[in-house]
Image (cartoon, helix red, strand yellow):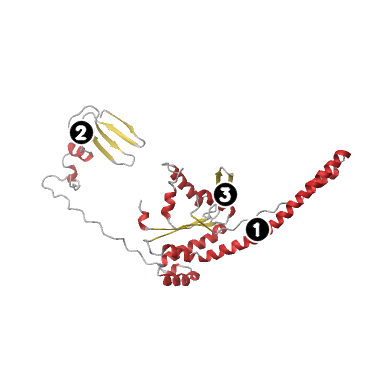
Amino acid sequence: MRREGAWGRDDHRWVLEECPWNGHTDNAAYIVKFGGGAIAAGCHHNGCQGYGWRDLGEHYEPGAYERNGHQAGPSEAAPGVDAWEPPEPLPHGLPPVDTFDPAMLPQCLRGRLANIAERMQVPLDYLAAGAMVVISSLVGRKLGIYPKKRDDWIVVPNLWGMIVGRSALLKSPALAEVMKPLGRLIADAQEAHKEELAGYEIKAMVAEAEAKALKKNIELLASQAAKTGDRSKLMEAAKTGGSEAPECPTLRRYKTEDATVEKIGDLLLENPKGILNHRDELSGWFRSLDKQGREGPTVGVDLLHVQFQLYFLPVQLALRKSAGLRSVGLGAEIDLRCVHPDETNP
């Protein structure tokens, strides 16, 4: 042994005094033990290519592998030893999948979804996955889980849903059918928002008029105080003030389509109870990671990391050039997607 020492991060290397196969003495022969426990050996000279740890053992102890019951591979077979048979071909097709059992669905959904599946001639699996995700989005942050009995650590569950099927198998129509009740809630929310907005505009007009009248009154009292030196009436009027400006009502959002990470943060600020993020094609989301400004080898990965943060962190600070630093309450962005099976391959 000529020398030994650490090699790389967790590995160890021994440099041999002499190559066991061709007698080289220029530090070309080596033994390496990797951090995981594997051992390798070799020599850097072209004439020694192909030699390894097994050959080193055979060099110093011929026949050791056969005595220990080791079966030689095709490239290792000695004369008179039969080589391995050709490998059997891999099976074709997909492994069998258990049929979805309707009993897994809540009783209140079972009949309706079974009826839709029969009418549309689509797998019940599609409808079941979509319905459970839609219901989860309505529950949102109203429920949480305490993983520890005597701890205040709370986790808000988030449900991801994805259906996989080939083209023309009615994936999108199936999801649209189970989201119809959500559509009615959206319509009701829009109608209620219109009424709230109308009332807000009237209150805003009154508040603006009161503010103008108050300003004129204060200007008049300020002019009188400048002449008399008595500012008591001026200060009293300023302390009284007018009515507070009304807060603009926010539209209750139940669903968003193909939203960016930044936009989802804005929506969660306005809808802290949670929201459904629906994407018709999952592959489109992956392609969005390569949009202009996100083409770098790490930018897309960082964006993906932020997307996952939206699902798992209870509070996330969102920084936008237009709006500064805001605290976004998260943990209830529920995801529902559909995809073609060929697009799931890496």
- Residue 300 in view (yes/no): yes
Q: Does 344 sit above or below residue 108?
A: above
Q: CA distance from mark 3 to mark 2?
A: 61 Å
Q: Answer with left or right where residue 204 lies relative to residue 119.
A: right
| Element under disc 1 | helix
Query: Badge 3: how crowded within 10 Å, few (<14), some, or many (20+)?
Result: many
Nearer to us: label 3 or label 2? 3
Could you say which disc has been placed on residue 328 in the image? 3
Q: In this orientation, which residue lies closer to the viewer: 103 or 251?
A: 251
Q: Return the residue at label 2.
A: 46
Residue at position x 67%, y 59% in the image: 198
**Numbered circle sitting on residue 331:** none
Residue 197 image label: 1
Residue 23 in the image, given as x and y percentages of width and height: 18, 29
Q: Is residue 298 left or right of residue 156?
A: left
Q: Nearer the viewer, residue 206 or 112?
A: 206
| Residue at left offset 23%, top offset 39% | 53
User: Mark 3: which amino acid?
Assistant: Val
* Residue at the image position 21 percent from the left and 40 percent from the top: 54
Outermost residue on the right side: it is 228
As measured in the structure, the alpha-carbon distance from the residue carrying label 1 to the one carrying label 2 is 81 Å
